[in-house]
Amino acid sequence: MLNKISNLQLILGLVLLGLIYLAVVYFDSPKSEELQKQLVTIDTARVTAITIAGPDQTVNLTLENQQWQVELKSGKKVAAVSSKVEALLDQLLRISPDRLAAKDQNKWGDYQVDSTGTEIQIKESGNTTLDMIVGQSGPTSYLRLAGETEVYASDGFGGLNNKDDIDHYRDDLFVRINTDSLTSISFNYPGDSSFQIINDQGKWKFEDGTMADSLKTANYLNQLKLKHNQNFSDQDGSTIGSPLGEIVINSKNEPQVLINVYYDTADSAVFNSSLNPTAYFNDDALGEGYFIGRSSLME
């Protein structure tokens, strides 16, 4: 009899534990409709401003005259790469919460969706249509809408990566030339070190008729085809002054291209091209690669 009672009590105890477990799962887990909640509902065609406020810096993007602009730390606005802005908006629209990570603010700090997270604000025609805080822990992103307490986890969002960096959105083009149509390149330097090379029916010569080395010239022209650079300088034409060196590139069917070198207040070389006039680059490799002397092209 005692064994039967003990077995019955054990069974009842297991049933009770099972009910408690089911109750905890039911009440603590988000209902299916909560997981289907669409966090981001924006009309990308109407977006006019994006602010990404991270722990280290704030990125301000604005659409002006159908061109995206990014604001530098100095307050000056320069051209942004539209495809990168569009990629950000597309990424936000694809957010799909996998689970509810927290229901109240006690866990905000753990998931970095408080002041330690990155806040994304989107405006459409001046009206804020998205205000969301993003935290990151490994491959998982944690998302909280401003004004709400719930924290959602998403393993497919992928995080912001470098999207909270101003330079990520800047146009990093330095030079892009169709070298097949080039007619001449002039290297204008201080003193008597200036020189010019001229394309004479496919053969490059110096201005005095001396032949340039074909391989060395081909290697130099190859650098003109396409060059990007991420070493942006905060300097611009208003603070640097006149260029100390200039490369003038002439083509048959393309506008003239200028590449200039300046020296800033820290006596560092700063480079700029007319193909991307608002961008200045601080990279000595550009000087070594482009601002060469006559001897570099001689046979």
Image (cartoon, rainbow, N blue to C red):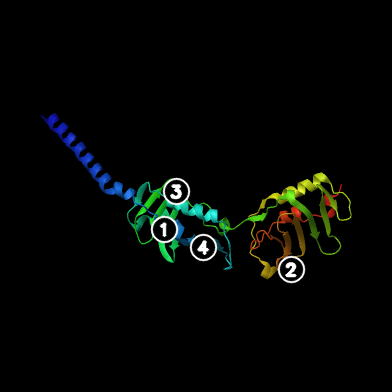
Residue 162: horizontal and vertical position, in percent?
54, 53
Where disc 3 sits, the SS reads loop
**Residue 116 visible, this angle:** no
Q: Which residue is mark 3?
A: 157
Circle 3/circle 4 CB separation < 8 Å: no
* Residue that protrudes farthest toward the left in the picture: 1
> Would you name the residue on which mark 1 appears?
132
Residue 242: assigned label: 2
Confirm whether residue 197 shows in the render: yes
Please tell me which residue lies in front, 14 or 165: 165
Mark 3 and mark 2 in contact? Answer it, CB < 8 Å: no
Left or right of 233: which side holds 46? Answer: left
C-alpha separation, residue under disc 2 versus residue under disc 1: 45 Å
Amino acid type for the residue under numbered disc 3: Phe
To which residue does mark 4 refer?
63
Q: Position of residue 146 (x, y in %)?
A: 38, 61
Q: Is residue 171 left or right of residue 148?
A: right
Mark 4 or 1, nearer chain start: 4
- Toward the viewer: 279 or 257? 257
Say which amino acid is labelled 2: Ser
> Is label 2 in a helix, a strand or a loop?
loop
